[in-house]
Amino acid sequence: MDLILKVLSGLWESSGFAALSWQNGVMLLVAFFFLFLAIRKKFEPLLLVPIAFGILLANLPGADVMADVTGGELGAIGQEAIEGAHWYESGVLRILYVGVKSSIFPCLIFMGVGAMTDFGPMLSNPVSLILGAAAQLGIYIAFLIAILLGFAPNEAAAIAIIGGADGPTAIFLAAKLASHLLAPIALAAYSYMALIPIIQPPIMKLLTTEKERQVEMKQLRTVTKTEKIIFPVVVLVLVALILPSVVPLLGMLMLGNLFKECGVVDRLSETAQNALMNTVTIMLGLCVGATANGAEFLQLRTIKIVVLGLTAFIFSTAGGVLIGKILYLVTGGKINPLIGAAGVSAVPMAARVAQNEGRKYNPANFLLMHAMGPNVAGVIGSAVAAGFLLVMFK
Amino acid sequence: MAVLGVFEDIYGVGAEMTPGRALLISLVGFLLVFLILGFLALFIKALGKGFDAAGKKQKKAPEPVPEVPVPAPAAPVGKPLPPTMSAGTLVLEDVSEEEAAIIMAITSEQTGIPLNRLEFHSIKRLKEGQK
């Protein structure tokens, strides 16, 4: 009898149940909730499923998928080195995490985004770039509030970039400036991107009149293929000369776009858009989720980051719409201010929201292509904003 | 809170991040995004004008007389199309005429735009998994 009890006691002590902390328990519930949102509600499922599963794996006690035997060389904070251990003896997701820490994954994702992006609407209506710039307002408002809330400048900058509504950019900057905040920042960024159809419409409605929302915009000019080929190369050179820190992100974005537009590397374009993009998305999502360890994640600062992220989104949307209103007045009513809200990146969801809102007030209105201009300009805008913050605080 | 990077060069090593400085950083950052994207807008505008001018020049150049007679357009120029017709030449890829007609009718119905104001260029059947 004594032997059986000892065996059972040993089994219990070596099981995950004994090592399960309340923080791990809460994070497992969070993982289940995210899986529900992704699978049942279809909220950004391509990213939320791997992220949720990463959270699940990282919070299973004893699994040690994020163990760092090097004592921090692979990006772990507060883990001690094991004497004589090699880096490849670390947890499997910790090794993959090097792709996040080194910014390889966000940059590769940007290449895929570039290969899927049509800059045509922006090229045909250059004023879109002004709307894309205006919709970065939330980044700087959030930065200011984060400083007032007591965050360090590098942390404030990493949190503020959530307002750019651009997942890879948020991960890129957070990994560089405040890697200990990567999980809450990435989760907030992707969660709010999924919630754009809920967050944006009330702000758009509040800041515009019914007359403005009904504006039908004229057909865009036709952009030649040569323009589309010249654009990524020249823009990269111009922006990189002004702000070199933006090159990793913008360079990969423009490389992907050149693959798409040049028409001679269809196989590379196809790979960047599909196979590579999907592979990196799986690894990025898993690794980001796996950084959400219960003990680190469940803190007051996470709630602050979530609130700051929402604030940033709201102000970014407002910034785009308000500059849209100014353009409406300046152009004598030719610009529908609703397309300004699409300047918050989140391609193409934000453009779809502008289209749907426009059609609510004028069923014959087609704003989608007009909104795609600020939408892709927002991608460039958030990359520039990230480059600026990197120069300031790296 | 120590200020890092470029602002450390300006305010000195270990300088504090005051709300005033944070506001200044925010203003400079926002302005910089506007300047860079505004500069790009001007560049794109100039590029577009250049291409439009080049396109007009090409159009003005005398065209050789075609040997084969050009087929008559679907509708006379200047005369509005009947409400049940759409403009342009339609290319069908792996789609039957009946299916194309249904797609065009649905598009018109869903968008609330009469067929004579719509122009379809091609209708293509997507393969499984293709976007």
Image (tube, grey):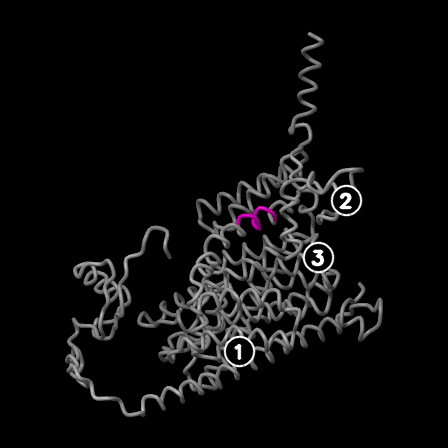
Q: Amino acid at mark 3?
A: Ala
**Total numbered labels:** 3
- Parent chain of label 1: A
Tell me the distance, in whole angstroms, between the alpha carbons under discs 1 and 2: 46 Å
Q: Position of residue A263 (x, y in %)?
A: 42, 68
The residue under the point 44% across, 49% down is A42
**Do marks 3 and 1 both belong to one polypeptide chain?**
yes
Mark toward the viewer: 1 or 2:
2
Q: Which residue is mark 1?
A: A130
* Magenta span includes A4: no
- Magenta-highlighted stretch: main secondary structure? helix
Q: Earlier in the sequence, mark 3 or mark 1?
A: 1
- Parent chain of label 2: A
Residue range corresponding to the magenta coloring = A282-287
- Parent chain of label 3: A
Q: Which residue is mark 2?
A: A71
